[in-house]
Amino acid sequence: MASLAQWVAGARPRTLPTAIAPVLAGWGAAAAPGAADGALPSWARVVLVLVVTLALVIGVNYANDYSDGIRGTDTIRVGPMRLVGSGTAAPGAVRAAALASFALAAAAGLTLVALAGQWWLLALGTACLAGAWCYTGGSRPYGYAGLGELAVFVFFGLAAVLGTQYILSGRITRTGCLAAVAVGAMSTAVLVANNLRDIPTDVAVAKRTLAVRLGEQRTRRLYTALVAVPFAVTLALVATRWATLAGLLALVYALPALRRVWGGARGPELLPVLRDTALALLVWAAATAAGLTW
């Protein structure tokens, strides 16, 4: 049986900034002056949105562990341990953990929809749940066809940030759209770094991620372009809220990650890039949210 520490590791805690950052950015856009009739967003709704995003990310991590494990694509790993692939936990137990996480996300989401009175948001929630499972699950997982990066941009950027802003303020603004693009790009960069690391092992198991399709050098250029997006958005936001310059603090983590990618890091050498990219995302979202409400 897997230990508690191994179950926690299987949840991939280092990916949790991709769940927290969209909520911070969406909250900042919703709380910015003029975004919601001067009323601050309800903290109860903020907490519920955070439960949804955290549960979805943990759920998709367990779902990926399960689906990749039963396919045998985790036999050779250079990244964090997988529960099923390593034989540490039974596939059924990992699948149950994924489904329990998705159920928690659904329950919190239903509560939010009821509070907001916007039942059309159920369609968005259903799409997010389906996207989380079908990334590596099902008979035709889109993550194996090079569409994972697009899904991350849509779900963790556009849907998560704009959904948060709308739930909290009842509006979607230009600021929210810019923040959604920034968070989506940096969240996608986390996956790109992950898939850059896994190119050799993915090729061996016929997993055709976008990184495999592009090749190593073009994947490094894609990563660089994605990491640059939030800082370009910061410069765009400064025109209306000078305090959003605080988003540049994320360079403390982004620059070391870029240096490793530009320096040709491969395999385990890219593990710090994933960590630093996720931290850069979190710092950018937190600092930008603070700047928007200053």
Image (cartoon, rainbow, N blue to C red):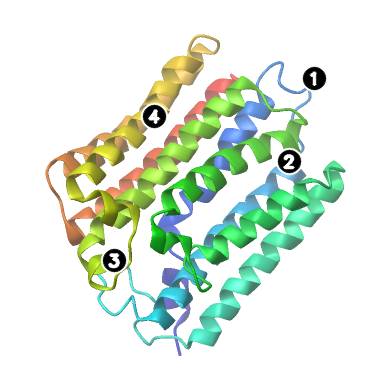
| Camera-side residue of 64 and 272 | 64
Image spot of residue 172 (x, y percent): 69, 27
Q: Are marks 2 and 4 in contact (CB under 8 Å)?
A: no
- For disc 2, the neighbor class at 10 Å (few under 14, some 14 to 19, many from 20) is few
N-terminal-most mark, 2 or 4: 2
Residue identifier under label 1: 37
Residue identifier under label 2: 43
**Residue at 57% across, 58% down:** 131
Residue identifier under label 4: 229
N-terminal-most mark, 3 or 4: 3
For the C terminus, the quadrant is top right
| Camera-side residue of 234 and 188 | 188
Q: In front of the other: label 2 or label 3?
A: 3
Q: Are marks 3 and 4 in contact (CB under 8 Å)?
A: no
Residue identifier under label 3: 79
Q: Are marks 1 and 4 in contact (CB under 8 Å)?
A: no
Residue pushed farthest top?
239
Q: Give the residue type that dot 1 points to.
A: Asp
Q: In front of the other: label 2 or label 1?
A: 1
Q: Are marks 2 and 1 in contact (CB under 8 Å)?
A: no
SS at mark 2 in the image: helix
**Residue at 55% across, 79% down:** 95
Q: Is residue 279 above or below residue 242?
A: below
Spatial CA span between label 2 and label 3: 36 Å
Q: Is residue 121 above or below residue 61?
A: above
